Amino acid sequence: MTKVDVGEFLREQRRGAKLSLRQLAELTGVSNPYLSQIERGLRKPSADVLQQIAKALRISSEALYVRAGLLDEPGPGRDVADAVLADPALDEQQKRALLDVYASFVAANRGDGAQER
């Protein structure tokens, strides 16, 4: 992931959540033109703006920070959690259940000596 794709990523997430720029602006308190500029790669969002957007889209703020170049890539297994958290087709209960199952599999494999696949 690179910081240049944060705008494209945000656009995909917004569209996946079936929100217009105006609706996202209302949810975040960030102006419609500013959000448009972020999506088109013309402006670099601050950590605060990213956090507001993440909350409105119900995605991981950490994933956005990585995309924007504010944080380093997370360790192994984080991609799975980020994908689950970013999926607008899942509700919060489903996301928690999937993450719990994933964590139990990882823990079981570590206990079994991390079997090869």
Image (tube, rainbow, N blue to C red):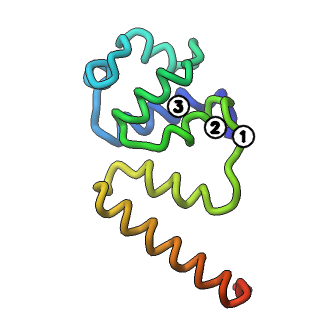
Near-viewer residue (57 or 21): 57
Task: Tell me which numbered mark, 2 or 1, is placed earlier along the sequence.
Answer: 2
Which residue is identified by label 3? 8
Q: Earlier in the sequence, mark 1 or mark 3?
A: 3
User: Quadrant of the rendered structure where residue 106 is?
Assistant: bottom right
The image position of residue 116, as x and y in percent, is 73, 86
Quick one: 16 or 61, which is closer to the camera? 61
Residue type for callout 2: Val
Quadrant of the image containing the C terminus:
bottom right
Cβ atoms at labels 3 and 2 below 8 Å apart: no
Alpha carbons under labels 2 and 1: distance apart = 6 Å
Measured in 3D between alpha carbons, the distance from the residue under mark 1 to the one under mark 3, in whole angstroms, is 19 Å
* CB under 8 Å between discs 2 and 1: yes
Q: Nearer the viewer, residue 98 or 17?
A: 98
Q: Secondary structure at mark 1?
A: loop
Q: Quadrant of residue 96?
A: bottom left
